[in-house]
Amino acid sequence: MKDEILQKSIDPTVHDMLAVAEAAGLETAWDRLAKQLPQCGFGETGVCCRNCAMGPCRIDLFGEGPTKGVCGATADIIVARNLLRMIAAGAAAHSDHGRDIAHTLLLTAEGKGGGYEIKDEAKLHRLAAEYGIPVEGRTKEEIAYDLAKAAYGEFGKQEGPIQFTRRAPARRVELWQKLNIDPRGIDREIVECMHRTHIGVDNDYVNLTLHGLRTAIGDGWGGSMIATELSDVLFGTPQPLWSEANMGVLDETKVNIIVHGHEPTLSEMIVAAAQDPELVALAKEKGAAGINLAGICCTGNEVLMRHGIPPVGNFLQQELMVMTGAVEAVVVDVQCIFPALGPLSACYHTQFISTSYKAKFPGATHIEFHEEHAYDIAKEIVRTAIEAFPNRVPERVHIPQEKMKMMAGFSVEAIVGALGGTLDPLLGTIKSGAIKGIVAVVGCNNPKIQHDYGHVNLVKELIKHDILVVNTGCNSIACGKAGLMVPEAAEMASEGLKGVCQALGIPPVLHMGSCVDISRILVACAAIANALGVDISDLPVAGAAPEWMSEKAVSIGTYVVASGIYTVLGVAPPVLGSPEVVALLTAGAEGVVGGKFAVEPDPFKAAQLIVDHVNAKRRALGI
Ligand code: BF8
């Protein structure tokens, strides 16, 4: 295997498929990145401004060029404005997802749900209690109607508070109020980002950044949390289950359908439709042995968490899975979907099926999804995939055989359940030092970093230091593929963590879901802080996104820091053009919200930073 290919990923299936791509003359994200190099230094450092037509302007950081934009904006202002717009986009993506789930719950409550039902009534009641919605003598649909309306209301609220923010420890909420960053309404904060970054509005980098924190809190403790909680009510709260990960989950004998994107609404129905006897019979009629469903990215994580549907890979494998020649359909909803899939699918028999009116793609077959007719549309999509099966070209089929067993399904409820109904045993292990801390490792792949190298090495290092890892998104899939999400992986952990995992029969790395499910991690942190009578910023916890690339990740990192948590990024955000903004994010923030960012591309050094931080927090707590 060529060294050039080996350098791109640590995953052998990726090496295998990159060789296939090269032989077939097909391009991938790695090739397109190479054609972009060197990337624009102004964009990379965040000093390019396109916010008005006097520009575009840029700041020359090193030469004799301009130090101000036409309006007089300095590097600090431009960098902070650009960062705020990234946060706004990320918060909008997560929150619009949450709104869609609220919409589905509302339709279901009204009996217009097209096949959905309320699966977790106990959680419905718990959430109703938080919102002060009466439950006595009422049907689950009546309660769900009020809950959906209340959740809807969070988006357009003018004066707050957003109910779920009150799950944070009281002193965290007081701090947010004191700093004037307690979000008023999810949409309001996002709109205000756009207003403040318009020419001639907010030109104070501290003020801009503080609003970034407020907007991001509205994502993590608002839009994302609504997405997670209402998805659990509708589709069931995840419980530990088994699955397998990586390209070897594709089945040469069956119709392979891959669900891709983020929202669980359609994919839940695809799971059901793929088992419909009528469609299974049709698949057999077309010469297949059956229907095989797999997932990628966070839609993949949603159906993995609740149904054990195997992930075929993470973000950077989306093109490679098509190149196996064995995929009949890639069914996409929203977010993290390469437009490159359109022309690529056209080189194969693969149906690239877009489903959201918000997300259309050149070269896609558009079968629009509407919740009211969810099951019927899911059946039509599965049927379209089956019809493509006879067009498969057997000579072009190349499926890497690697796959790995993994566990998933660790919702907070499932973790508490595994601990015997209370967090006390976990607190005991933290106090005794058997578990030194808990670290969330999350986020994307980015072709600027060797695929999965940052994820897998950081997690391996952390568990060697008695740190329990919780993860979501593309990190979960990376760790699943690497064999870190089975109880036997405890052998790779240090003694204390190994003992705890073996006693409970759990992996040292717990899959908590999709990226909106980072809200589950916030809930867990709040519960632990409340149990110890401290703030989240006092806990021996940290966050990391070793290979992040999306604006959603910027919003996530920001709400994690705003929640008081130290966060290490493997890729520098485009802020390096302003030493002031860098100092604020990596140092000053700690004195204000108790959390701050660090950037460390080397996962081994990042692990050391995190271990040092966890130990310092333990010493401060006197444990
Ligand atoms: O929301 S981790 S590449 S799939 S953005 Fe996208 Fe990043 Fe993967 Fe999920 Ni999250």
Image: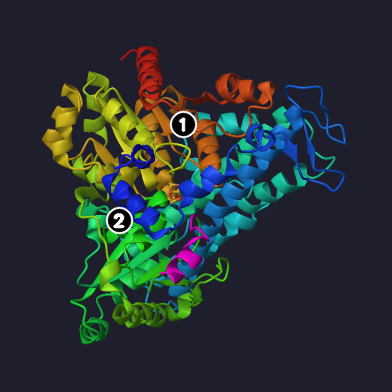
Residue 616 coordinates in the image, percent (x, y): 39, 14
Identify the residue at horizontal 33%, vertical 41% (top origin). Answer: 2
> At numbered mark 2, what does the secondary structure look like: helix, strand or loop?
strand
Coloration mode: rainbow
Q: Is residue 94 above or below residue 397?
A: above
Residue, disc 2: 311
Depth check: give the residue in front, 55 or 398: 398
User: Does residue 40 appear left or right of residue 262 in this picture?
Assistant: right
Identify the residue at horizontal 22%, vertical 26% (top origin). Answer: 429
Q: Which residues fall within the magenta stretch?
A: 336-347
Q: Which residue type does callout 1 highlight?
A: Gly
In contact (CB < 8 Å): disc 1 and disc 2:
no
Residue 597 coordinates in the image, percent (x, y): 52, 26
In the picture, the disc for residue 419 is none
Q: How many marks?
A: 2
Residue 289 seen in this snapshot: yes
343 falls in the magenta region:
yes
- Quarter of the image for the C terminus: give it: top left
Q: Which residue type does callout 2 highlight?
A: Pro
Corner quadrant of residue 321: bottom left
Depth check: give the residue in front, 361 or 8: 8
Residue, disc 1: 570
